Amino acid sequence: MSVTTSFPGVYVTEDQSAAFSIGTASTTIPLFSMHYEFAQTAVGFESWLDVVNYFGSGLSLEDPATAGLRAYFAAGGGPCYAVSHDYLEREAANLSSTVSLVVANNFDIPAEFTDLNSDDGIFLILDGPKDELTTANRPTRYGKNALAAVYYPWLRAGWTETDIAPSAVIAALYCKNDRTRGVWKAPANIALPGGFTPKYKVTDDLQGQYMSAPAINMIRTFQDQNPVIWGARTLDESGEWTYVSVRRLFISVERDMRAAMNTLMFEPNIPLTWEKVRSAAANYLRRLWQQGGLAGSSEEDAFFVQIGKDVTMSDTDIAQGKMIMKIGLAAVRPAEFILLQFTQSMPGG
């Protein structure tokens, strides 16, 4: 819009077109599976006090699921939801725009849940076997799933005689890691808070047996330190989605992009709209790269965004109301194996 100026000063014009940007949604809202008598509709909890008030005189830390909630908040977990295991799948679907994690919390997640979380971008934190693992009794109940990770062994705490599902404490550490470092940082080499101890000892040899798919992420104690998460692998075996952080990064980006694109429904499918979308997506990914969430020494190495006629869309696509954007990310991967090579320099050599 042209502005007629006749004297020095500040001239204001208003642009009626809506601004478009892509925000970042929370990646740290878990949904806990609870015992069968629990509520059929998901209940939200902000703190352990909320849980105490909810149960009242019926609170029992001898119930493994309730003990898991206690462990979650004791380990630094934030707001969460919980629902009866019978209604877990339904409520996960209902809360798919809010919930980003589903926590087994002492329960087996049904195989059909895989279809749900692949569509809704929900990551599953599963419990390893309650019994002691050996090199000979490898569990077979875990199928290939790039949206799930398993943790072992179960934990103990001084405030209950009940063994605590590792998924409950791991969920809290996922949340802490996302808040302090970012979803792209592998949730591993993170110490459990004081008071939690693994039920069984894990050796290098034992962990080595469970590094291949279906991988089991171990909780280990080294010397006099607090136990740490010592693994960052999903149940995928293809190599593309081997690491928890890589899969969850893509889930996070996809969620944010989807939410933003919903605001553009029925906008004109024209170059002006495409440029708004491209610019907003590039700005979002640039921030992610600057925060350390993407690999590459330059923006060009870290990501790309493509949209346009004869680039990502044909005339037919546009006529059918399709606006297609292509995005590429260079995800950072954890340094899982650090190899040190030493060479001795001999005098006079």
Image (spheres, rainbow, N blue to C red):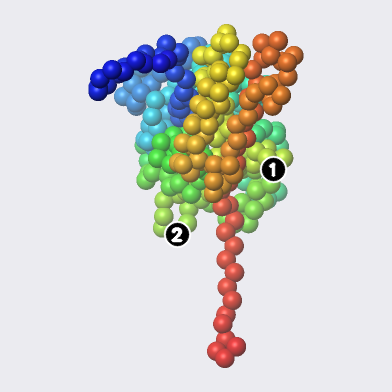
Q: Does 256 sit above or below residue 165?
A: above
Q: Does 91 sit above or below residue 278?
A: above
Quick one: 282 or 178, which is closer to the camera? 282
Quick one: 324 or 105, which is closer to the camera? 324
Q: Quadrant of the C terminus?
A: bottom right
Q: Is residue 209 visible?
A: yes
The quadrant holding residue 141 is: top right
Q: Residues within 10 Å of mark 1 (few under 14, many from 20)?
A: few
Residue 194 location (% of width, % of height): 37, 45
**Residue lying at 56% horizontally and 10% vertically, measured from the top left:** 267
Query: Label 2 to label 1, Cα distance in Å?
Result: 32 Å
Residue 195 location (% of width, % of height): 38, 44
Quick one: 192 or 233, which is closer to the camera? 233
Q: Residues within 10 Å of mark 2 (few under 14, many from 20)?
A: few
Viewer-nearest of discs 2 and 1: 1
Q: Mark 1 = which residue? A: 239
What's under tag 1, amino acid-wise?
A: Gly
Q: Is residue 191 left or right of residue 184?
A: left
Residue 242 location (% of width, % of height): 64, 41
Q: Quadrant of the N terminus?
A: top left
What's under tag 2, amino acid-wise?
A: Gln
Q: Is residue 86 visible?
A: no
**Residue lying at 62% horizontally and 46% vertically, measured from the top left:** 133
The quadrant holding residue 306 is: top right
Q: Mark 2 = which residue? A: 223
